[in-house]
Image: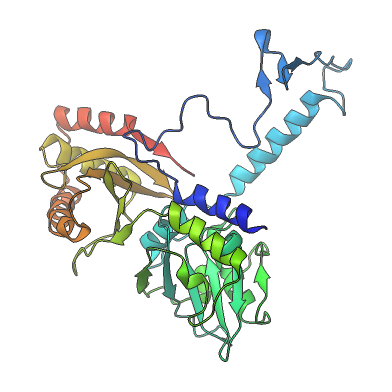
């Protein structure tokens, strides 16, 4: 991948949510990647402004093998098969589940040294990262002590992110220094992340505000690499992980998107139970993080629910830690409640569900 293409891929990942108030909804009319051709009047296909003549059916009412309809049906079947194979909650059971979801979906630049499982024949240290140059799956940095790097935001994604990352980690242990892996190779029933790292270990994360860590310390990058790093730096949004205290649940990540700041709080609870608790808190007037905040909505990804708050961008991220803990306490109380829902709480739940979207 060229440096420009790598930067483009990176920029798309960093701008997962634009800073508008409707940051979770794709703009109307946005084209779908790999989607069907645009349709013109009366539903006829249009490509480059030219209408295509409809293709007739065979006598058995099935599409001809070389027809557009046959191709579309084949693509639809392939998409359905892929969707059915996708693992709904790939990081379930890992202590670092919430941070792994955040790293994969919206954190721009962060790294953490992994603690490998005892059964892994570790040849070298492995650093987990958000995105690597060119959005490759993994690479081995040369040096006196070569180090493996594994990206969570890969250009090519399989049906099971846990298996993808596990395969990339294992690849770093046998690859030669200087090599990179574009896409991990996985096999059905092969190792998953819980098999290659300590499932009970949290991630000791380092959050970066640039991508200078792409280049080893003391090394001057060539002009092309330097240009890619600079492009990536221009696209990055300042981010921080909030300290929720010893009793904090999940992973709350602050980001400055310009006109607004946000907190995306990845939660590990069952989605329905969490939505019910959010409804109880909302009905009681507590669905906020204090003055200068408002609940923006939530999104579902990797089998977990992520509440999102809009925040005053003038305040430092550490100023939101105390309000976040207070909200966390209100939410914990609501999660522990087993009393029947009131009509007000049911209305709140319906309203919150209407503002929820699913990423994958």
Q: Residue lying furthest bottom in this view?
A: 144
Residue 322 horizontal/vertical position (percent): 12, 58
Q: What x and y, as percent, mark residue 85?
A: 61, 49
Residue 203: image x %, image y %?
37, 72
Q: Is residue 196 above or below residue 99?
A: below
Left or right, 333 with respect to 127, comes to left
Q: Determine the image quadrant of residue 221.
A: bottom right
Left or right: 217 in relation to 191 = left
Q: Is residue 11 left or right of residue 168?
A: left
Side (left or right) of 308 relative to 86? left
Image quadrant assignment for residue 75? top right
Q: Quadrant of residue 292?
A: top left
Return the residue nearer the eye: 187 or 150.
Answer: 150
Instruction: State which quarter of the image contains the N terminus.
Output: bottom right
Q: Is residue 157 visible?
A: no
Residue 189 in sight from this viewpoint: yes
Question: Residue 127: horizontal and vertical position, in percent?
Answer: 49, 75
Residue at 35% across / 47% down in the picture? 305
**Above or below, comparing residue 4 to residue 67 in the picture:** below
Residue drawn where x is 46% and y is 33% of the image? 26
Residue 213 vs residue 158, the one in the foreground:
213
Which residue is at the front of the view, 97 or 205?
205
Q: Residue at x 51, y 56 (%)?
A: 231
State whether residue 62 is above or below residue 35.
above
Q: Residue furthest top?
A: 42
Number of numbered discs overlaid on the protein picture: 0
Visual colour scheme: rainbow
Q: Reply above or below: 339 against 324.
A: above
Which residue is depicted at the point 89% across and 15% down? 59
């Amino acid at each position: 991948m060229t440096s420009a293409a790598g930067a483009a891929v990176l920029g798309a990942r960093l701008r997962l949510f634009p800073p508008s108030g409707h940051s979770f909804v794709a703009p109307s009319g946005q084209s779908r990647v790999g989607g069907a051709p645009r349709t013109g009047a009366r539903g006829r296909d249009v490509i480059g402004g030219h209408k295509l003549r409809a293709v007739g059916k065979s006598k058995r009412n099935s599409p001809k093998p070389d027809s557009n309809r046959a191709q579309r049906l084949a693509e639809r079947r392939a998409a359905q098969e892929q969707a059915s194979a996708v693992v709904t909650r790939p990081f379930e059971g890992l202590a670092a589940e919430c941070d792994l979801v955040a790293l994969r979906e919206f954190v721009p630049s962060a790294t953490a040294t992994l603690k490998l499982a005892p059964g892994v024949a570790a040849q070298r240290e492995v650093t987990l990262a958000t995105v690597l140059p060119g959005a490759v799956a993994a690479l081995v940095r040369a040096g006196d002590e070569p180090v493996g790097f594994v990206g969570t935001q890969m250009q090519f994604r399989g049906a099971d992110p846990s298996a993808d990352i596990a395969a990339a980690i294992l690849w770093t242990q046998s690859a030669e220094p200087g090599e990179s892996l574009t896409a991990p190779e996985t096999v059905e029933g092969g190792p998953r992340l819980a098999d290659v790292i300590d499932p009970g270990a949290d991630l000791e994360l380092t959050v970066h505000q640039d991508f200078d860590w792409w280049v080893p310390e003391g090394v001057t990058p060539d002009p092309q690499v330097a240009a890619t790093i600079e492009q990536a730096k221009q696209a990055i949004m300042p981010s921080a992980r909030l300290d929720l205290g010893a009793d904090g649940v999940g992973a709350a990540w602050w980001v400055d998107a310009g006109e607004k700041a946000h907190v995306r709080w990845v939660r590990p609870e069952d989605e329905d139970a969490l939505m019910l608790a959010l409804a109880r808190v909302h009905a009681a007037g507590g669905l906020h993080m204090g003055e200068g905040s408002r609940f923006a909505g939530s999104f579902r990804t990797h089998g977990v629910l992520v509440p999102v708050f809009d925040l005053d961008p003038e305040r430092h991220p550490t100023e939101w830690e105390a309000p976040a803990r207070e909200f966390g306490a209100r939410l914990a109380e609501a999660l522990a409640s087993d009393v029947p829902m009131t009509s007000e709480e049911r209305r709140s739940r319906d309203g919150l569900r209407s503002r929820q979207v699913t990423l994958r």
